[in-house]
Amino acid sequence: MNLHEYQAKALFRKYGIPVPAGRPASTPEEAVAAAEALGGTVWVVKAQVHAGGRGKAGGVKLARDLEAVRGAAAGMLGTRLATHQTGPEGLPIEKVYVESGSEIAREIYLSLTLNREKGRIALIASSAGGMEIEEVAAKTPEQILTTTVHPAAGLQPFQARQLAFGLGLTGEQIKEFQHIALALYRLYQEQDASLLEINPLIVTRSGALLALDAKLNIDANAVFRHPDRGGAARPQPGTTRWSGAPASTNSITSRSTVTSPA
C-alpha cells in the first residue's frame, strides 16, 4: 500500500525527521492559498503520484510568485503524469503538494528496506543523491553504502555514524544524520513499512539536513493495525503497488559496500 509524499512527510514530522514546510492542494486556488500560508518567495509544486521520476516528467515545478504557483498547479491537476515507472498511460494527478523552497548544497540518498537474501532490514545510503539508485548501483556501485540491522538489536547509533562518516558528513551533520536514521528505523518498524526512501536528503547551504522527498510503502497486511490511518494508504487509480520501489533491491544491497554488517 502506498502513501503520497505529503502523507509520508506528515509521518516524518511526527517522528521528528526534518522536512520543508508544505501543504497539499486539490485546486489551483488551494495551491495559491497554501503558498500564501507558507510565506516566502520561492515554492515548489509537486504532483502527487505513486511514481519516481516526477521531476524529469514535468511533475515538479519551481515557482517564484503566486501566479506561477497557480499556473503550475493548474497545469498538473486533472492531467496524467507519465514517467519511466508508470508506462505511457501515466497516472492521474488528483493533488499537488506546495512546499517552501530549499537552498541545496548537497544531495544524499537514504533508504530502509528488507534485504530478502539476508532476511534483515538494510539501511542504504549514497552520496549520489537525486539520481535513480538502480543507475548508481549499475554504474558506480562504490558510491553505495549499506549496513544491515540485527533484528534483536535494532539499528545502532554507531551504524548510523559509520554511514555518516562514509558520506563525508562532519560535525553536527553526523549527529543530525544519526537522529534521522534512527527515527526512520523507528518509523519503519512501528508503521509496518516495507520500503522507505528519501531521495534526496539534502544538506542545505546553512549545513542542516532536510528530507526533500519522502516515499513510503507499507505492508497491506498490516493496515488493520493502524485504524487512525483511515484512507491515507490506498492504491492510486491505475496502480497496485508503489511504482517508486526499486525493481531489484536485493541486487542493490548485495553490490553495496557493507560498512557494518549486523
Image (cartoon, rainbow, N blue to C red):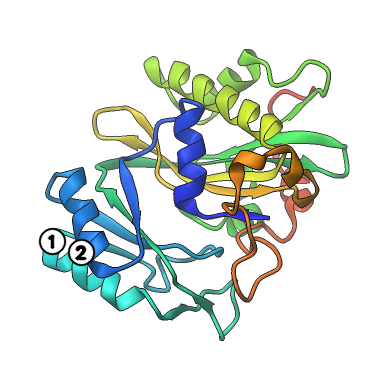
Question: What amino acid is at disc 2?
Answer: Val
Question: Mark 1 — residue?
Answer: 66
Q: Position of residue 178 (x, y in %)?
A: 53, 20
The residues tagged by marks 2 and 1 sit, at their Cα atoms, a distance apart of 5 Å
Q: Residue at 45% across / 66% down in the picture?
A: 54
Q: Residues within 10 Å of mark 1 (few under 14, many from 20)?
A: some
Tell me, yes or no, whether the two marked residues, 2 and 1, touch with CB atoms within 8 Å: yes
Q: In the image, is residue 104 above or below residue 237?
A: above
Question: Mark 2 — residue?
Answer: 69
| Quadrant position of residue 46 | bottom left
Looking at the picture, tell me which residue is in the foreground, 120 or 214: 214
What quarter of the picture does the C terminus occupy?
top right
Q: Position of residue 212 (x, y in %)?
A: 40, 44
Looking at the picture, tell me which residue is in the foreground, 59 or 201: 59
Q: Residue at 40% across / 31% down in the picture?
A: 18
Looking at the picture, tell me which residue is in the foreground, 247 or 228: 228
Image-based side of 27 in relation to 235, left or right: left
Looking at the picture, tell me which residue is in the foreground, 210 or 174: 210
Image-based side of 212 in relation to 53, left or right: left
Question: What amino acid is at disc 1?
Answer: Leu
Q: Position of residue 125 (x, y in %)?
A: 58, 38
What label sits on residue 93 in the rendered view? none
| Quadrant position of residue 86 | bottom right
Image-based side of 27 in relation to 16, left or right: left
